[in-house]
Amino acid sequence: MSKSIATNRNAFRNYHIGDKYECGISLLGNEVKSIKSNRININGSYVAFIRSELYLINAHISPLANGELFDPTRSRTLLLNKKEILKIKQQLDTKGYTAVPLSVYLKKSLVKIEIGLGKGKKLHDKRRSIIERDRQRQAARELKRKNT
């Protein structure tokens, strides 16, 4: 059973998400305590391939009030198998693909992050997804009204 800590709702709004990967993240002890107390924000963060490793960039982990201070937005290494890293790199080299963090969660007391490879949505794609979501809500309302 995994406990979700943070989700990046903008990722699904701005990208067509394809492949998803679960990976570990290299953290300091104080950062782990901060994450377990829900003090992480992954909105606006992304994953970059630097020197044959994947890094989580621009994720903000707020330090605890009584804990040791650290840089809240430092780059953090993502822990994946070599095959997975090469597969992700190959897709990132393809034009238009980006790796974005989707969620941060605990799995057996380990902090895990789910990243997704996505292609950016154009404005008309965003509008279409909003219209589709509204249609689904309206259909659910009609179905609920008929059942009562």
Image: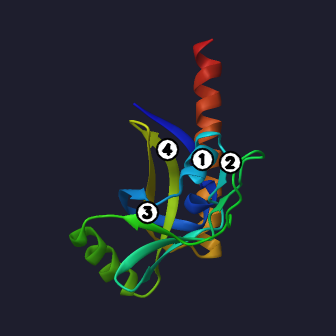
Residue 116 image label? 3
Query: Residue visible at 62% across and 72% down?
Result: 124
Q: Quadrant of the C terminus?
A: top right
Query: Residue visible at 70% across and 48% down?
Result: 67
Above or below, 47 against 135 in this view is: below
Pointer 4 local density, CA inside 10 Å: few below 14, some 14–19, many at least 20: many
The residue mark sitting in front, 4 or 1, is: 1
Residue 39 image label? 2
What kind of colouring is applied to the model shown?
A: rainbow
Marks 4/1 in contact by CB < 8 Å: the verdict is no
- How far apart marks 2 and 1 lie (CA) works out to 5 Å
Q: In terms of sequence position, does the residue under pointer 4 or pointer 3 come before the other?
A: 4
Quarter of the image for residue 50 reads bottom left
Q: Position of residue 81 (x, y in %)?
A: 25, 65
Quarter of the image for residue 117 reads bottom left
Residue carrying label 1: 35
Q: In terms of sequence position, does the residue under pointer 4 or pointer 1 come before the other?
A: 1
Q: Position of residue 147 (x, y in %)?
A: 58, 15
Marks 2/1 in contact by CB < 8 Å: the verdict is yes
Residue 105 image label? 4
Q: In terms of sequence position, does the residue under pointer 3 or pointer 1 come before the other?
A: 1
Q: Quadrant of the N terminus?
A: top left
